[in-house]
Amino acid sequence: MSDSTPEATPLAASHFIAEPITVEFDEAPLLEKDPHCPNRFVWRDRAFSVTELVSEWHSYERHNKMAENMRPAHLRAASRRGSWGVGRSCFRVRTTDGRVFDLYYDRSPSAGDRKGGWFLYREWSRVDATSPDAVRPQNDAGCRQAAPRTRTPRR
C-alpha cells in the first residue's frame, strides 16, 4: 500500500520563478533581517495563504570580494549567524491550494532599500513516485540546508 498523502508524494521542480513577492505576517518578526515564515504572500497580484512550513534553512555565506574582507575568525562566526546585509532565510511552504513553493528573504540591501527583499524562488509539482522525475527536493535557493523543521506558520 502506498502513502499518497501530499507530504509523502515526491516532488519535481516544475519551474524556476525568481520573482519578487510581498509577504504578510500575522505576527511581525522581532528582527527585520531575521524573519520567520510568512503567513501569506502575493505573487503576480494573487494572494497565497501558507498552511504548512515544510522546511526552513539559512545561509550566511559570503561570496566573491565579500568573502575576503574579514579576518578568518570573524568569517567563521559570520558564516554561522550572519552579518549585516549577508545571507538568506529560505522557506519551503505549502499553500491552501496544496501547491509547494520555495521562497526566501535576501538580507542584502538593494538600490534604495536597506532592508533586503522577499523572492519566490520556484514552485514544486507532485509526480508519480515511479516516474524518473520523482525526486526528493533539495534545498538550494542559494542556501545551505540546516536541519529541516516542520511546523505550522505563526498565527
Image (cartoon, rainbow, N blue to C red):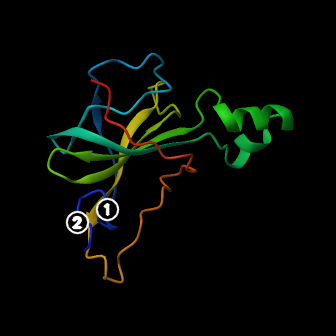
Q: Secondary structure at mark 2?
A: loop
Residue annotated with mark 2: 4
Q: Is residue 113 above or below residue 7?
A: above
Q: Is residue 61 left or right of residue 113?
A: right
Q: Is residue 2 in sight in this rendering? A: yes
| Mark 2 Cα-neighbour bin, 10 Å: few <14, some 14–19, many ≥20 | few
The answer to the question of whether label 1 and label 2 lie on touching residues, with beta carbons closer than 8 A, is yes
Residue 122 is labelled as none
Q: Position of residue 81 (x, y in %)?
A: 65, 31
Tell me what residue is drawn at x 49 percent, y 46 percent.
Answer: 148
Mark 1 → mark 2, Cα distance in angstroms: 6 Å
Q: Quadrant of residue 95?
A: top left
Q: Secondary structure at mark 1?
A: loop
Q: Quadrant of residue 59?
A: top right
Tell me what residue is drawn at x 16 percent, y 44 percent.
Answer: 96
Residue 8 is labelled as 1
Tell me what residue is drawn at x 62 percent, y 26 percent.
Answer: 84
The residue most toward the front is 1
Q: Position of residue 82 (x, y in %)?
A: 64, 32
Tell me what residue is drawn at x 31 percent, y 76 percent.
Answer: 129
Q: Amino acid at mark 2?
A: Ser
Q: Is residue 1 above or below residue 30?
A: below
